[in-house]
Image: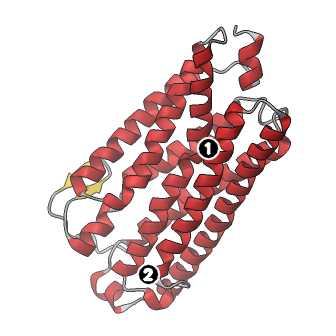
Amino acid sequence: MTDATTHKRYRYEPSLAAAVIFVVLFCATSGFHLYQMTKTRSWLFIAFCSGGLFELIGYICRAIGATQTEEPDYALGPFIIQSVLLLVAPALLAASIYMELGHIVELVQGDPYILIKRRWLTRTFVTGDIISFLMQAAGGGILGSAKTSSQRDLGTTLVVVGLFVQIVFFGCFIFVALLFHWRIQRAPTQKVLSDRPPYNRHLFALYGVSSLIFVRSIVRVVEFIEGFDGYISTHEAFIYVFDAVPMLAAMLIMNWIHPSEIEALLRGGSVAKGIRLIEHYEITDNST
């Protein structure tokens, strides 16, 4: 049983077992992502891999916090690190998702069907993502070391606004992707008709990852609006059910349906498909 000061910081007794489980899981998926990225040279996934490392470090710091039965000076560091990294990691995952949609549009030569011109597509959504990231990081840092109510209020405001920015941009992104998908399914381009590139499964992977981050962000907004004594903030299960599990699922989806397939069809190179690495890739299943 930890003492009252540790409870005051986490507002519950943090579970060492849960933290260790997710350290192992995020280590596995992040390590596999790094392997897939370097082997296939899918550099658009640098941000995604960085998000995975943030998750890994965040849960390592939660595990450290769960072992501390006293309140030494160094205990504040792991608490702030896990607070900030777990808060901002999804923004890094989102950045790569935004970039992949632009590459899918290029692959199928679907520029006439995209609501935002492709040269502005990635810039627009990544800019929103950067704004969201910086606001959440600043707010999380302030909250982690806040000593007064005014500091907590400022940190909370920055985090909530940053999360709202993330939700708005994600909502717009999902709408743009769905509209593009509907249009190209309704009237396929010549590229789709002749080569039948596998764009469908990659779009569905984007929808899955986007939905997971979207739901997670909504729950985090509710958490911060409720305040430090709210139901979500005082029950550790929420950080795992609505943050750790969705982000792990998002990373596993992209392990399995890796964007290197799109990159290889555009520019050549190796492909990561599931657990396989294909050196010389060709479309063999004629499936979109």
Q: Which kind of residue does numbered mark 1 sit on?
A: Leu
- Mark 2 neighbour class, 10 Å CA radius: few under 14, some 14 to 19, many 20 or more: few
Is residue 82 at all visible to an observer of this figure?
yes
The quarter of the rendered structure image containing the N terminus is top right
**Residue 132 shown left or right of residue 181 in the figure:** right
Secondary structure beneath label 2: helix
Q: Which kind of residue does numbered mark 2 sit on?
A: Arg
Q: Colour scheme of this structure image?
A: secondary structure
Which residue was labeled with disc 1? 87
Residue 102: x and y in percent read: 43, 74
Residue that appears at 62% across and 57% down: 132
Which residue was labeled with disc 2? 119
Residue that appears at 77% across and 34% down: 233
The quarter of the rendered structure image containing the C terminus is bottom left
Q: Quadrant of residue 104?
A: bottom left
Residue 219: x and y in percent read: 73, 47
Residue that appears at 79% across and 38% down: 152
Q: Residue 103, relative to residue 141: is it above or below?
A: below
**Residue 126 shown left or right of residue 274 in the figure:** right
Q: CA distance from mark 1 to mark 2?
A: 29 Å
Is residue 187 at all visible to an observer of this figure?
no
Disc 1, disc 2: CB below 8 Å?
no
Secondary structure beneath label 1: helix
Q: Quadrant of residue 107?
A: bottom left
**Residue 213 shown left or right of residue 126 in the figure:** right
- Mark 1 neighbour class, 10 Å CA radius: few under 14, some 14 to 19, many 20 or more: many
Give whichever of 188, 263 is nearer the camera: 263
What is the number of callouts on the image? Answer: 2
Residue that appears at 63% across and 72% down: 172
Q: Residue 103, relative to residue 238: is it above or below?
A: below
Residue 189: x and y in percent read: 39, 90
